[in-house]
Amino acid sequence: MKPNAQEKAALTGGSLNPMNISKKIDMNTIPKQSAIEKQIKCGVKKIGYDFETRTGFLQLPDTHCTDMNGAIQLFKAIDSQVQGIYAGDVHYARIHSEWVAGLMRGHHTEIEAGLVADGSAA
């Protein structure tokens, strides 16, 4: 048996207009991507930059990884002479004018905790 108009109205919050159903969703609970996240193509928890060593730091959510070019462009906008970027368990390094990527198994946790590349406290 099909619901009548009155039952349909009760199911949709008093209106037969389907647009009223979507208005009941709290738009603040839907996560929005930041401009940085759009650029690096993943989520980000924290971002930092050390001007002395010209090194950028991205703390990422578990299982996330950056777009290399996006991360490089992000930190070049902060300092055009950026030399390295730590992003999760990946290190991007500028060697002469070329960028290379390498995995850092087991080291990213210390770096994300606030240590710089040489192991000293930040």
Image: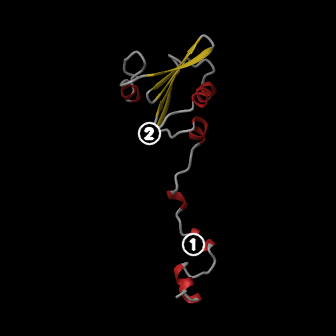
Residue 97 coordinates in the image, percent (x, y): 63, 13
Q: Earlier in the sequence, mark 1 or mark 2?
A: 1
Residue drawn at x 55%, y 50% as measured from the top left: 32
* Residue topped by disc 1: 21
Proximity of marks 1 and 2: CB atoms separated by less than 8 Å: no
Residue 89 coordinates in the image, percent (x, y): 43, 27
Q: Is residue 13 above or below residue 43?
A: below
Q: Circle 1 — which element?
A: helix
All told, the count of numbered labels is: 2
**Crowding near pointer 1: few (<14 within 10 Å), some, many (20+)?**
some
**Crowding near pointer 2: few (<14 within 10 Å), some, many (20+)?**
few
The front one of 34 and 107 is 107
Given the current orientation, which residue lies at the most extreme front position? 1
Colour approach in the figure: secondary structure
Amino acid found under the numbered disc labelled 2: Pro
Residue 79 coordinates in the image, percent (x, y): 60, 22
* Residue topped by disc 2: 61
Residue drawn at x 64%, y 77% as measured from the top left: 17
109 relative position to 48: left or right: left
The C terminus is located in which quarter?
top left
Amino acid found under the numbered disc labelled 1: Ile
Q: Is residue 64 above or below residue 101?
A: below
Q: Is residue 13 above or below residue 120?
A: below
Q: Circle 2 — which element?
A: loop
Rendered image: mark on residue 101: none
Could you give the CA–CA distance between mark 1 and mark 2, rounded to whole angstroms?
Answer: 33 Å
Q: Is residue 57 above or below residue 64?
A: above
Residue drawn at x 44%, y 39% as measured from the top left: 61
Residue 62 coordinates in the image, percent (x, y): 42, 38
